[in-house]
Image (cartoon, grey):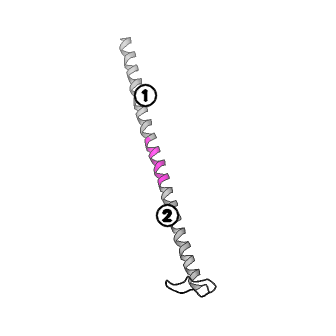
Amino acid sequence: MGRSSESQQGSALLITMIVITILGTIAFAIGASTVSSLRRQSQIEDSQNAYQAAVSGLEDGLLRFRYSKDTETPLEVGAKLLV
């Protein structure tokens, strides 16, 4: 009867270790997925910020060009240069 009890305890320990390993693997996978998702979201936000900054710069340049009196305007196509 002593051997059966030791065998059952060994089996219970092995099953417990397998379950803990499986749970640890699942927890690690969820954590890695979360970190990857956060990085991807951060890259998307950076991309959107860069796009908005570029659009803002273009709008600022166009407004300065339109309302500034001391900027030179480009020649029209077909215009003659007076030298």
- Identity of the amino acid at label 1? Met
* Residue 56, above or below 26: below
Task: Characterize the local packing of mark 2: few (<14), some (14-19) or many (20 or more) Cα atoms within 10 angstroms.
Answer: few
The relative height of residue 64 versus residue 34 in the rendered view (above or below) is below
**Residue at the front extreme?**
83
> What is the chief secondary structure element of the magenta stretch?
helix
**Amino acid type at mark 2:** Gln
For label 2, the SS is helix
Q: Is residue 58 left or right of residue 22?
A: right
Q: Position of residue 26 (x, y in %)?
A: 41, 39
- Please provide percent x and percent y for residue 21: 43, 32
**CA separation in Å, label 1 and label 2:** 47 Å
Residue picked out by circle 2: 48
Q: Which residue is mark 1?
A: 17
Disc nearest the viewer among 1 and 2: 2
The tag on residue 26 is none
Q: Position of residue 9 (x, y in %)?
A: 40, 20
* Quadrant in the rendering for residue 63: bottom right
Image quarter (top left, top right, bottom left or bottom right) of the C terminus: bottom right
Which stretch is magenta? Answer: 29-40
Residue 6: percent from the left, percent from the top? Answer: 40, 16
Rate crowding at label 1 as few (under 14), some (14 to 19) or many (20 or more) other CA atoms within 10 Å.
few
Which mark sits nearer the N-terminus, 1 or 2?
A: 1
User: Residue shown at 40%/34% (left/top)?
Assistant: 22
The verdict on residue 39 being magenta is yes
Quarter of the image where the N terminus is located: top left
Disc 1 vs disc 2: Cβ atoms closer than 8 Å? no
Quick one: SS at disc 1? helix
The residue shown at (40%, 24%) is 14
Instruction: Indicate whether residue 79 is drawn in magenta.
Output: no
Q: Is residue 14 above or below residue 45?
A: above
> Which residue is painted at 50% across and 66% down in the image?
51
